[in-house]
Every structure is written in C-alpha cells, then in structure tokens.
C-alpha cells in the first residue's frame, strides 16, 4: 500500500506539471471566437445547440496570424450536439471536420477540438503561442 504522503506528493507533482487549461489563454479565446464567427457565417448558432456538444476547426498553425483571428473564417469545421457523452461529441465533430477538409482538399491544417460544450478546449502549440506573442 502506498503511504498517503507519497500519494499526495505524486498528485501534487502531476498537477504542477500539467499544462495550463486552454481556456485561460487569450489566443485560445481568439481561436474560439473565430470558430463561432465561422459557425455564424453558416447560420449555425453553436451556443443554441443542446449540451454534450463539441466543435472542431481545421487550423493551419503555420499560417495562423492575428489578422485571421480578428476577421478570418475557417475553411473546414465540424460540430456535434445532443449526444450521449462529450467523448462521442468530440469524435463526431472531428470526423465532420476531417471529412470537410478532405472534400475541400485542404493541405497543411489539422482538425482540432476548439469547443466542448461551452468551454474553450483548444490547446495552442507552444511555438505558435510564442510566435503570436502569447
């Protein structure tokens, strides 16, 4: 049996080394705003959908810049809602995004989860955060 003190130290170490929550980043918030703007462009209100939902976007991390974050629209999206659980919502949204990216023959972007329910879930690669001054 593991002594409680060692278990507490192990949990503390894991928490201390865990990455910051994506939604604490201004850059993550800007990507989420771009996602919601793109959804609105296609006349879909993400917030109006039932819970157990997710949204994904095909993001080209190499070309992502502040101008896009202020006014750009994603070329490929995926979303799902009213599912049994969030894992399934994320999976289905990701499949939708990948299918749209394939159909549009997009190169250089990857479909990443941007929203889960009402939370921003996108994780920014460190090099992109550094390049964009985050």
Image: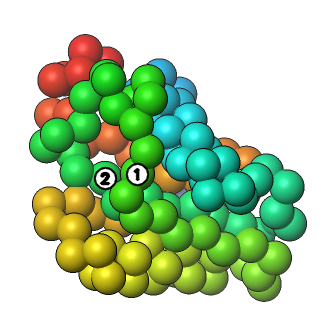
Q: How is the image coloured?
A: rainbow
* Residue located at (66% from left, 74% from top): 80
Residue at image mark 1: 74
Residue 47 image position (x, y, % from top left): 79, 50
- Relative to 10, is 120 on the left or the right? right
Which quarter of the figure has residue 67? top left
Which of the labelled discs sits on residue 4, or is there none?
Answer: none
Residue appearing at x 43%, y 72% in the figure: 97
Give me the disc on residue 59: 2
97 left or right of 55 in image: left
**Image height of 82 relative to 6, above or below:** below
Q: How many circles with numbers are drawn on the protein?
A: 2
Viewer-closest of 3 and 8? 8
Element under label 2?
Answer: strand
Quick one: label 1, few (<14), some, or many (20+) residues within 10 Å?
some
Give me the C-alpha separation between circle 1 and circle 2.
7 Å
| Left or right of 117 on screen, residue 78 | left
Q: Position of residue 59 (x, y in %)?
A: 31, 53
Query: Quick check: 77 above or below 74?
Result: below
* Location of residue 82 in the rendering, given as x and y in whole percent from the top left corner: 81, 76
Query: Counting residues from the N terminus, which is met first, the one under dot 1 or under dot 2?
Result: 2
Quick check: 7 above or below 15? Answer: below
SS assignment at label 1: loop
Q: Which residue occupies the foreground of this view, 109 or 4?
A: 109
User: Residue 119 at what x, y percent from top left?
Assistant: 66, 46
> Mark 2 Cα within 10 Å, few/some/many (few <14, many 20+)?
many
Q: Residue furthest top?
A: 133
The answer, for residue 70, to whether it is visible in the render is: yes
Q: Do the numbered discs 1 and 2 sit on residues whose CB atoms are within 8 Å?
A: yes
**Quarter of the image where the C terminus is located:** top left
Residue shown at the point (20%, 34%) measured from the top left: 128
């Amino acid at each position: 049996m593991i002594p409680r003190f060692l278990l507490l130290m192990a949990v503390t170490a894991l928490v201390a080394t865990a990455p910051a929550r994506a939604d604490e980043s201004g850059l993550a918030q800007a990507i989420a705003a771009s996602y919601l703007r793109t959804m609105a462009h296609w006349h879909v209100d993400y917030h109006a959908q039932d819970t157990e939902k997710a949204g994904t976007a095909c993001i080209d991390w190499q070309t992502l810049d502040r101008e896009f974050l202020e006014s750009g629209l994603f070329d490929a999206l995926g979303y799902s809602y009213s599912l049994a659980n969030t894992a399934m919502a994320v999976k289905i949204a990701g499949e939708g995004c990948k299918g749209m990216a394939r159909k549009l023959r997009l190169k250089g972007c990857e479909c990443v989860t941007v929203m889960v329910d009402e939370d921003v879930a996108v994780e920014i690669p460190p090099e992109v955060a550094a390049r964009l001054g985050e």
